[in-house]
Image: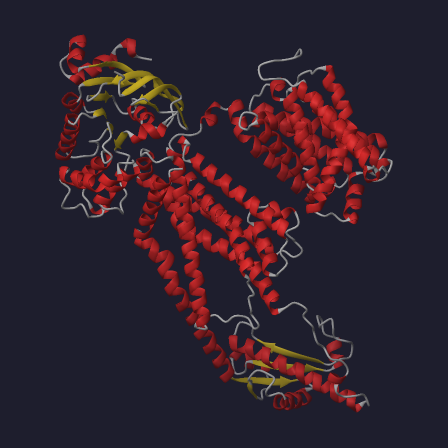
């Protein structure tokens, strides 16, 4: 990175932005001026409304056999509780037809009283009413503000009147009259005021930041590449001695700076509004933010800002014009906002899979920090995830500026026209995303898939095998090459047979490790185990549905299609990890993802080393069959001692080493094909 | 002595949504000599702009190689761009910068010695006759003025190689003549210039050597005098038609 070029470009970008007067007016000055005006106007309007309603003398009527009693109670309660109820002036209008009077606006509401007998015969009366109890109904017009408000106040008064009436009735029948003396209702809050405030702020702080940074950053981002493309200045810039890395870094930094500046301006506005009492903070609001908490939050928000900046930059680069960039912005903004609202979900701690979901992890971490319960290892993991994501996005943004279809939008990607294998490589991940979505939606919404057999047939045969056949047909792929249908050396088969029982032990080790981060209750384990191996199914069917079919269909899909599609796009290690992760994601349950992902990595590595799908297929089948056998015979791997465990892992490692030693090198084949 | 610009069997294939695979540049080779104006003469869509975009490293070649002052366009694109000024109708100016700021920015970004930038900017402002509006924003300048600022920004870092890709497109006669004068002046300063055009008279007046490019291939490359001799035609227009209509040159 040439820092002097980067600095020059950054200053240049900022100068261009500052000189965009309309942008500055619309993004900074207008909100700063209009917002307090709007809030003041709203406050003034609310105050005026409250005053008007308080000054109003509500006209009402009472009808029915209990009119006298209710009228007396209202008058008595109104005078007794004049300080505890909201200001309320009312006057009764005598009328023979209250309904008509309400219709013509002569009264705001009327009270209809009915005896217990009358009420018992009414349809749709309140469920909580006991038989024989008189009914008092307030009839009003909800579409009229005054009528609605009057109804609220008279109901409040009637509730108090009913209480007084009950006390009177109790006293008349010889009971202690003061209900307040029967029991006292109180609540004790163990959280400090600071923690309560921290929870409130922590729930929303990330969402507010994401919202402000997205909207603020978009002011710069949408123009910074899409606008330059449209004006023709991007090509001018690309012909200078500045490298693509410096151009991207400067633009990215400019976006983040603008986003930060606008966020700070809005925060400053907010404090000014509080000072001016345009916004009133909740009662007891007291934010306790120590320096270490502030620093931790800053460490999490910094990569978040870079991530958002990079997303906006990529969006701007991808769009062919400023207008198109605006079209893409909204869904991306909504998605970002949705992730940032994860902190609102109850019962989602940072010590869960959420720690690896970008933006959502910061949202939950910020909440835990602000309530004073920071989980430091998980906060560190969150920070690392965010730094990783931010770096990857910056790298991708730089690569985008090297893509001709991005710089010169008239030209499409070669693969679109060549079709076949080249296009398959570009589309394979979309296929798997669609397959995952179908599997997810079907499992949750199709009751016909409730049985194990039907679900397996749907997932494995219809989805995995069906989609693989479709891909082969659509992209006209060579079956043998795509699925790596090759024979391997006998020693590889031997190694696979040794690996079958030991792979399960390795998976158990991974499961134990995953359990540290995503703790799973015993209850959940048992119910999941029962759902995988439901009782009452013949054993041979269990082996067919849980071992044979998944091994055949999943190996064709993952180590055949997916591996073939991504083989030329990723390096071997990244390839194995990617396919492993996708494989894990298809095993929906959260705590099963990690062990199945590891198994997926191992199976992919075997496919890469042997150049064949068959050894992995056997290992997959054997591993699943071993799991079924263990489930049927109540074999608990936890009962194994450490030495047994170590021996199993050693045999597994030896098997892998044998396979590695007999690997197929590019351009050579050990066996007949 | 190594030629400042050397192009060997350069190819570029595009994929257009409407037309599918297009061989925009098909194995072209040429060299430019020090201090000459080398013309790329061809109709619209002949492959001139694609060739020049590859030379300026905006896009990468599909195959073949090209080097500018020994810097390979694929392996050392930044080295190429440091020594190159690229001007085309599609390379616009920043509307919110002044003429002076524009020249200054391009001198700095192309790593002109920092201590000499101000002198260089003043010199170019005077030379291109833009003193009066040097501090006006580009979006308030007329087309002719913008053209001058554009050329000034192209040569702001005093590059040895300058590419002009159809520089007079959309200009009136007077402004086009001013651009031609600027190119002549740059030649006298010893710059090596590649000048692409579809206007025959411009090529006749300015170019020391002319390459006739058609359908992504170079059909002929020589001095105007030699082209006249080899074809028996006098006017460049006739020479151009001679090569383009030659059945041997059809795909």
Decide if residue A548 is in sight here.
Answer: no
Residue found 39% across the figure and 47% down from its top = A254
User: Residue A78: x percent and y percent?
Assistant: 61, 88
- Residue nearer the viewer, A110 or A491: A491
Q: Dividing the image into 4 quarters, which one contains the C terminus of chain A?
A: top right
Residue found 56% across the figure and 87% down from its top = A90
- Residue nearer the viewer, B102 or A486: B102
Q: In the rendered view, does A672 fall on the left or right side of B221?
A: right
Residue furthest front in the image: B115
User: Residue B220: x percent and y percent?
Assistant: 24, 13
> Quarter of the image holding residue B217?
top left
Is A666 situated above or below A359?
Answer: above
User: Residue B87: x percent and y percent?
Assistant: 25, 32
Q: Dividing the image into 4 quarters, which one contains the N terminus of chain A?
A: top left
User: Residue B158: x percent and y percent?
Assistant: 22, 32
> Quarter of the image holding residue A406?
top left
Decide if residue A659 is in sight here.
Answer: yes
Residue found 44% across the figure and 69% down from its top = A273
Q: In the rendered view, does B52 fall on the left or right side of A320?
A: left
> Quarter of the image holding residue A624?
top right
């Amino acid at each position: 990175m040439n820092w002097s070029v980067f600095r020059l470009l950054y200053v240049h970008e900022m100068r261009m932005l500052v000189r965009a007067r309309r942008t500055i007016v619309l993004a900074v000055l207008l909100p700063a001026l209009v917002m307090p005006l709007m809030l003041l106007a709203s406050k003034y309007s609310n105050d005026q409304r409250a005053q008007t309603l308080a000054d109003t003398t509500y006209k009402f009527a009472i009808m029915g056999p209990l009119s006298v009693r209710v009228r007396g109670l209202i008058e008595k309660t109104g005078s007794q509780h004049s300080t505890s109820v909201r200001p309320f002036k009312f006057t009764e209008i005598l009328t023979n037809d209250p309904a008509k009077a309400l219709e013509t606006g002569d009264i705001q509401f009327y009270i209809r009283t009915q005896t217990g007998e009358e009420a018992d015969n009414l349809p749709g009366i309140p469920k909580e009413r006991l038989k024989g109890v008189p009914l008092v109904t307030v009839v009003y017009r909800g579409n009229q503000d005054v009528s609605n408000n009057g109804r609220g106040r008279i109901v409040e008064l009637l509730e108090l009147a009913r209480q007084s009436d009950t006390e009177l009735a109790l006293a008349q029948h010889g009971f202690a009259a003061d209900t307040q003396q029967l029991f006292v209702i109180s609540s004790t809050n163990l959280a400090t005021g600071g923690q309560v405030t921290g929870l409130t702020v922590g729930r929303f702080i990330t969402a507010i930041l994401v919202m402000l940074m997205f909207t603020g950053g978009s002011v710069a981002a949408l123009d910074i590449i899409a606008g330059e493309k449209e004006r023709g200045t991007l090509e001018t810039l690309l012909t200078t001695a500045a490298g693509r890395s410096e151009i991207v870094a400067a633009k990215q930094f400019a976006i983040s700076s603008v986003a930060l500046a606008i966020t700070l301006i809005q925060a400053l506005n907010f404090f000014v509004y509080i000072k001016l009492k345009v916004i009133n903070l909740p009662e007891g609001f007291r934010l306790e933010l120590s320096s270490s908490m502030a620093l931790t939050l800053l460490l999490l928000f910094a990569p978040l800002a870079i991530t958002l900046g990079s997303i906006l930059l990529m969006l701007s680069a991808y769009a062919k014009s400023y207008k198109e960039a605006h079209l893409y912005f909204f869904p991306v903004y909504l998605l970002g906002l949705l992730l940032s609202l994860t902190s609102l979900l109850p019962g989602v701690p940072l010590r869960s899979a959420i720690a690896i979901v970008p933006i959502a992890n910061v949202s939950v971490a910020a909440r835990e920090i602000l309530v004073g319960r920071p989980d430091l290892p998980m906060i560190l993991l969150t920070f690392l995830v965010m730094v990783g994501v931010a770096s990857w996005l910056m790298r991708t943004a730089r690569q985008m500026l090297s893509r001709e279809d991005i710089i010169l939008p008239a030209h499409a990607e070669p693969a679109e026209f060549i079709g076949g294998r080249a296009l398959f490589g570009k589309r394979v991940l979309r296929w798997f995303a669609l397959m995952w979505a179908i599997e997810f939606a079907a499992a949750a919404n199709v009751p016909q898939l409730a049985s194990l057999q039907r679900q397996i047939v749907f997932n494995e045969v219809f989805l995995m095998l069906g989609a693989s056949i479709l891909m082969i047909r659509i992209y006209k792929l060579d079956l043998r090459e795509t699925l790596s249908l090759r024979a391997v050396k006998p020693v590889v088969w031997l190694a696979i047979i040794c690996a079958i029982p030991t792979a399960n032990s390795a998976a158990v080790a991974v499961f134990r490790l995953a359990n540290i981060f995503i703790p799973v209750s015993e209850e959940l384990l048992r119910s999941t185990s029962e759902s995988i191996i439901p009782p009452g199914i013949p054993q041979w069917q269990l082996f067919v549905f849980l071992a044979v079919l998944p091994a055949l269909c999943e190996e064709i899909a993952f180590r055949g299609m997916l591996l073939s599609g991504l083989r030329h796009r990723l390096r071997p290690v990244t390839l194995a990890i990617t396919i492993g992760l996708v494989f894990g994601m298809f095993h929906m349950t959260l705590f099963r993802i990690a062990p199945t992902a590891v198994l997926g990595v191992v199976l992919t590595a075997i496919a890469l080393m042997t150049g064949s799908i068959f050894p992995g297929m056997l290992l997959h089948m054997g591993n699943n069959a071993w799991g079924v056998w263990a489930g049927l015979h109540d074999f608990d791997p936890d009962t194994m001692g450490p030495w047994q465990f170590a021996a199993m892992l050693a045999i597994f490692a030896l098997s892998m080493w044998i396979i590695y030693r007999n690997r197929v090198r590019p351009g050579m084949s050990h066996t007949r094909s | 002595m190594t030629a400042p610009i050397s192009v060997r069997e350069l190819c570029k294939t595009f994929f257009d949504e409407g037309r599918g695979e297009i061989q925009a540049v098909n194995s072209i080779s040429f060299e430019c000599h020090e201090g000459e104006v080398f013309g790329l003469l061809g109709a619209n869509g002949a492959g001139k702009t694609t060739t020049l975009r590859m030379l300026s490293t905006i896009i990468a070649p599909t195959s073949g190689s090209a080097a500018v002052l020994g810097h390979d366009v694929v392996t050392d694109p930044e080295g190429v761009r440091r020594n190159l000024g690229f001007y085309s109708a599609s390379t616009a100016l920043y509307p919110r910068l002044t003429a002076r700021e524009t020249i200054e920015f391009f001198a700095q970004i192309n790593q002109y010695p920092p201590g000499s930038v101000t002198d260089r900017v003043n010199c170019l402002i005077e030379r291109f006759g833009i003193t009066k509006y040097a501090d006006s924003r580009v979006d308030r300048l007329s087309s002719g003025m913008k053209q001058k600022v554009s050329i000034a920004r192209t040569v702001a870092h005093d590059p040895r190689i300058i590419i002009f890709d159809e520089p007079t497109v959309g200009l009136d006669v007077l402004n086009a003549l001013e651009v031609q004068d600027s190119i002549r002046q740059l030649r006298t300063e010893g710059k090596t210039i590649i000048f692409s055009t579809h206007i025959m008279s411009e090529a006749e007046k300015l170019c020391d050597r002319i390459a006739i490019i058609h359908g992504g291939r170079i059909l002929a490359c020589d001095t105007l005098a030699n082209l006249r001799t080899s074809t028996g035609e006098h006017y460049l227009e006739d020479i151009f038609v001679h090569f383009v209509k030659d059945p041997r040159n059809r795909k």
